[in-house]
Image (tube, helix red, strand yellow):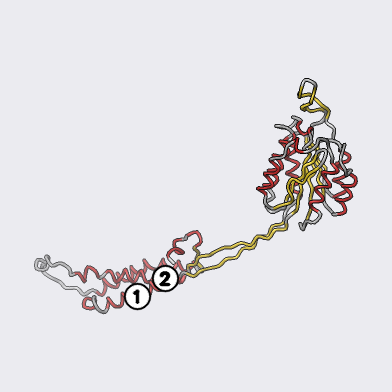
Amino acid sequence: MIKELMDWKHLSFAHPWYFGLLLLLPVLLWWQNRNKIKSTPSLRLTTIAGIKGVKPTWRVRFRPVLTVLRMITLTALIVALARPQTSNTSESLNTEGIDIVISMDISGSMRAQDFKPNRIGAAKDVALRFVDRRPGDMIGFVIFAGESFMQCPITIDHLVLKEQIASAKNDMLQDGTSIGMGLATAVQNLRNSKGKSRVIILMTDGVNNTGLIDPATALEIAKAYKIRVYTIGVGSMGQALSPVQTPMGEQLQMVPVQIDEPLMRKIATETGGKYFRATDNKSLEQVYDEIDRMEKTKVEVTSYKQYAELFLPFAALALLCLALELVLRYTVFKSIT
């Protein structure tokens, strides 16, 4: 009980207006002293020499204890009437999450340095921040180049997911660009999901040039499962500085940026998504921010409050002090009242 009273953060009063009665306590003290002075008998003496050395008895000195007990009684009674109580709040969190798969191109061209540190590094950074902003969603991760691979199935364990995103590298798959495979593998992961909405974020910096499934077929599969696809073309306009293998070894050269934007727009439009073009780190971040705003997860928080009444100790204290005052008044201090 004492622990609950000391918990000021959760302490409240059901009827706090009763504390206004505390203003009457000084008035009662003044009224009591005024009546005491009026009712005190007077005796006129020609001299006080005979009683000057007489000291008051202990009963006289301790008589104010009765007034203290009366004030404590009234104060405790007022606090009890205000009904102190502590509250314990519990919350029930209900989410209608969105199931998302990030399908990322990790082909050799993603090493181009028109992004910092390069395209794949920037893509992983913004994907990790995107995951952090979606705590209620199931998210998966697909990588593709000349072939595709489900790096992480859709999961609510975002710590594992982020480890898989961070570990993605250019040399994990056969080189090439298979947009159809990247899309089809993402659809495969989402087709049995139970989310109220299913979304794919498909990111590439090139043109489809290989793969067992062509993009048109993968698009029809996504439409059949009613999966919305946001497509992102990654790469600066014109040319970009990229590592190129030469007879002298790997060297940085300016190479043309080729993105099949008509295909990417077609995939996004026909699935109800949107196509974006990111030409640097900032614009790539803005793309993910916009997708985050468009795909909102519904979260309902229901709060429950339980109250514990704490007026009983104050009521008991008031009765105890009142009883003690009455006993002292009619026993120990009876002869001087």
Horizontal and vertical percent position of residue 273: 83, 48
Using the image, tell me which numbered label, if any, was put on residue 290. Answer: none
**Which residue extends farthest left?**
50
Q: Amino acid at mark 2?
A: Pro
Dot in front, 2 or 1: 2
- The answer to whether 64 appears left or right of 263 in the picture is left
Total residue callouts: 2
The numbered mark, 2 or 1, whose residue comes first in the sequence reads 2
Along the viewing direction, whichever of 222 and 60 lies nearer the viewer: 222
Using the image, tell me which numbered label, if any, was put on residue 313. Answer: 2
> In the picture, residue 72 is in which quadrant?
bottom left
Horizontal and vertical percent position of residue 174: 80, 37
- Vertical position of residue 241 compared to residue 311: above or below: above
Q: Which residue is mark 1?
A: 322
- Vertical position of residue 216 compared to residue 169: above or below: below
Q: Residue at x 65, y 60 (%)?
A: 93
Q: Amino acid at mark 1?
A: Leu
Horizontal and vertical percent position of residue 120: 74, 36
Q: Residue at x 73, y 55 (%)?
A: 97
> In the picture, residue 285 is in which quadrant?
top right
